[in-house]
């Protein structure tokens, strides 16, 4: 019988991320490249100088996902003071049946 030759693929032990980092390292004598800076998100309520209200359901829906979960502060871009207020008003609106607790199926 003829034997089949088994070939194996050699997997590099260096992760792809490390390979990319090594590529981006400047060589000796080259200037360092600055990283991109992001603009800081500005709180919607601080900018417009208003307070979150349970009656403004269209605005409160902006701060909930399609699964009716409250969006975290990192994604919403609100300051901590207004994030707490929005959370409180969303919960109040839910109890008054202005906003859903769960999404419609």
Image: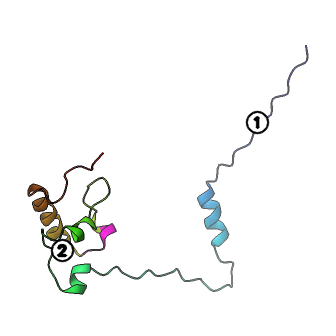
Secondary structure, mark 1, is loop
Q: Position of residue 20 (x, y in %)?
A: 63, 64
> Relative to residue 79, is residue 12 drawn left or right?
right
Residue at figure coordinates x 23%, y 71% from the top left: 59
Q: Residue furthest right?
A: 2
* Mark earlier in primary sequence (2, 1): 1
The answer to whether residue 67 is above or below residue 7 is below
Q: Count neighbours of disc 1 (C-alpha within 10 A) and say few if under 14, some if 14 to 19, many if 20 or more.
A: few
Residue 97, image quadrant:
bottom left
The answer to whether residue 89 is above or below residue 10 is below
**Front residue of this view, candidates 68 and 55:** 55
Image quarter of the N terminus = top right
- Colour pattern of the rendering: rainbow
> Relative to residue 71, is residue 36 drawn left or right?
right
> On the image, numbered disc 2 is attached to which residue?
82
Viewer-nearest of discs 2 and 1: 2
Magenta segment: 74-78
> On the image, numbered disc 1 is attached to which residue?
8
């Amino acid at each position: 019988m003829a034997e089949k030759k088994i070939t194996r693929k050699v997997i590099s032990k260096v992760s792809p991320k490390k390979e990319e980092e090594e590529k981006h390292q400047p060589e000796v004598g080259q200037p360092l490249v600055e990283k991109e800076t992001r603009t800081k998100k500005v709180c919607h309520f601080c900018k417009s100088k208003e307070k979150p209200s349970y009656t403004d359901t269209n605005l409160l829906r902006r701060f909930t996902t399609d699964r009716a979960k409250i969006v975290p502060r990192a994604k919403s871009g609100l300051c901590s003071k207004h994030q707490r207020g929005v959370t409180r008003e969303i919960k109040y609106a839910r109890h008054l049946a202005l906003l859903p607790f769960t999404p419609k199926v």
